[in-house]
Image: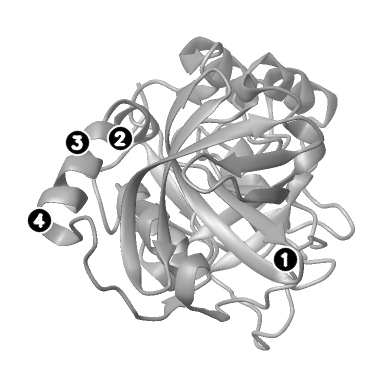
Amino acid sequence: MKNMKTRIAAAACAAITVLCGAQALNASAFNYGHPYSGNDQEWCEMSMGRSLRMWQSYSHPEGSYWYQTVQAGTMVGKGFTTAHSSNWPVNQTLYGGIGWVRYLACSHFGFEQGKAAWLELPKTDFTSSGYYRRGDQIFLKQGNSYHAVFLTGINGDNFTVSELDGTTVKWGVAYKRLSNYRLKRVSDGAIFNIQYVARPIAEGDANGDGWVNRNDVIWIEQHNGNANYSNVNNDLLLGAADVTGNWQLDSSDSSEIYAHMYESEGYMVGNYRYVLASW
């Protein structure tokens, strides 16, 4: 069994206002173990309740005041594309309700804010409640106003979330998933249009679709040895796909993903973590 190495892209873009268009694969550095947290994918999936209890009881109880800014980190589109709907430059400052949701995500997955990398998944991927997972950041719009919620529980089309009401922390807020990519807040009937969903980039997610499954095994076999594509963040692609850490995309990666994926849940079991954008 290998020693798991969290992938770190050593070179960030010099200008933080762009996501590095057609980024060439550059010399990256490995960090042995997670530099900020012991959280692997399995821990994050299984321990959401423990995180919630900590936040609700000690860190940010219901009705408490929260107002601070959060560094967005790096956002890429599905397939590690450098185009995405959020239009956030690297490490743009987030605040208000959107900042709260990103803060919770960084806390749960164990990321230092500016070093996190997030995958933006289009709303069209979420044709049923089964495509959502706890820990998702769901970005919403109502009229000209933007909102975001942090998904903490799923029961069919009934969601439980945390959100910020002005500067007030709310836990256990009930939403219902509606057709046509909408969410309804049960307490006041407010309806929001889903814009997209953000997730951390998991090691093993070679094709960048937000899930680790046999499609990633097939993708590596089809793209054997090639990790450089136009308009793709190739550092993040390699960080996700090269699970063996040999700097190659080859059958050793596809075999390891196949052997350790928990396909029905879409993540890797074992000492597999998440891809970071910079050291």
- Dot 3 falls on a residue whose secondary structure is helix
Q: CA distance from mark 3 to mark 2?
A: 5 Å
Q: CA distance from mark 3 to mark 4?
A: 12 Å
Rendered image coloring scheme:
one colour
Q: Nearer the viewer, mark 4 or mark 2?
A: 4
Where is 59 relative to 10, above or below?
above
Earlier sequence position, callout 2 versus callout 1: 2
Front one among 78 and 233:
78
Front one among 275 and 33:
275
The residue to which callout 3 is attached is 50
Residue 195's disc number: none
Where is 267 relative to 16, above or below?
above
- Quarter placement of the C terminus: bottom left
Q: CA distance from mark 4 to mark 1?
A: 32 Å
The residue drawn where x is 41% and y is 63% is 164
Q: CA distance from mark 1 to mark 3?
A: 30 Å
